[in-house]
Amino acid sequence: MASLIDAISVKRKTLFEHENTPFSCLEAEVNTPTARGGQTLVRLKMRNLLTNAVFEKTFKASDKFKEPDLQSAQASYLYSDGDGSHFLDQETFETITLNEQMVGDALDFLIDGALIELRRFNGNPIGLELPMFVELNVTSTEPVVRGDPSGGGSKPARLETGLEIRVPLFIKEGEKVKVSTENREFSGRA
């Protein structure tokens, strides 16, 4: 039997099940009333792990959630086509196909062979979790013009996946950069 989680103890990145659907908490805010007898409420900004929809909902502090039946397995990215994106489970060596909705904008960070965490709910694949940082090659960027104040210390660069980010002026084409998958920003040289 899965253990129960109190609404008041749900924090950022907590996984829980509500109405037979797995969710991930993005933000949690506790509102304690000032009047006697008022109920403590918990406002959660949460992501539905099946549809990727994000919404906010308020719960009583005493509400309970089940722990979701989620499993994670390491998988490597193979390719994408009209049927979806294909991954190779590193434990079973089975090919798993995720549709566009399950992958979301993760393709901006995936190159052949990239390792990700594949999520399953009740045994069925529902999506993936990227590492915090990925290393990608810069395929095109403008050369630096000395004394050009318009760039503000950064310039646009296109990466091998097609993602465009801003990088420092010293980054050149062909260099490998570290990119945050959470905020889609340059994090350093790889």
Image (cartoon, rainbow, N blue to C red):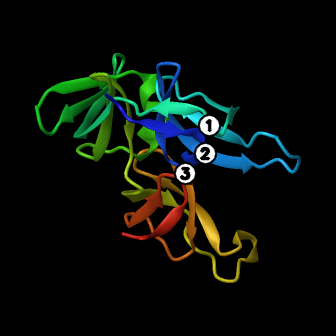
Cα separation between marks 2 and 1: 7 Å
Q: Which residue is mark 3?
A: 164
Q: Which quadrant of the structure image shows residue 68?
A: top left
Residue 42 in view here: yes
Name the mark nearer the viewer: 2 or 3: 2
Q: Residue at x 36, y 43 (%)?
A: 110
Element class at badge 1 = loop
Q: Which residue is mark 1?
A: 62
First in sequence: mark 2 vs mark 1: 2
> Where is 113 relative to 166, above or below?
above
Q: Residue at x 36, y 17 (%)?
A: 82
Name the mark nearer the viewer: 1 or 3: 1
Q: Which quadrant of the structure image shows residue 147?
A: bottom right
Mark 1: which amino acid?
Answer: Ser
Q: Residue at x 41, y 34 (%)?
A: 67
Q: Which residue is mark 2?
A: 8
Does residue 90 appear left or right of residue 136 in this picture?
A: left
Q: Which quadrant of the structure image shows residue 123?
A: top left
Name the residue furthest front. Answer: 37
Q: Quadrant of the N terminus?
A: top left
Callout 2 touching callout 1 (CB < 8 Å): yes
Element class at badge 3 = strand
Mark 2: which amino acid?
Answer: Ile
> Where is 31 relative to 154, above or below?
above
Mark 3: which amino acid?
Answer: Glu
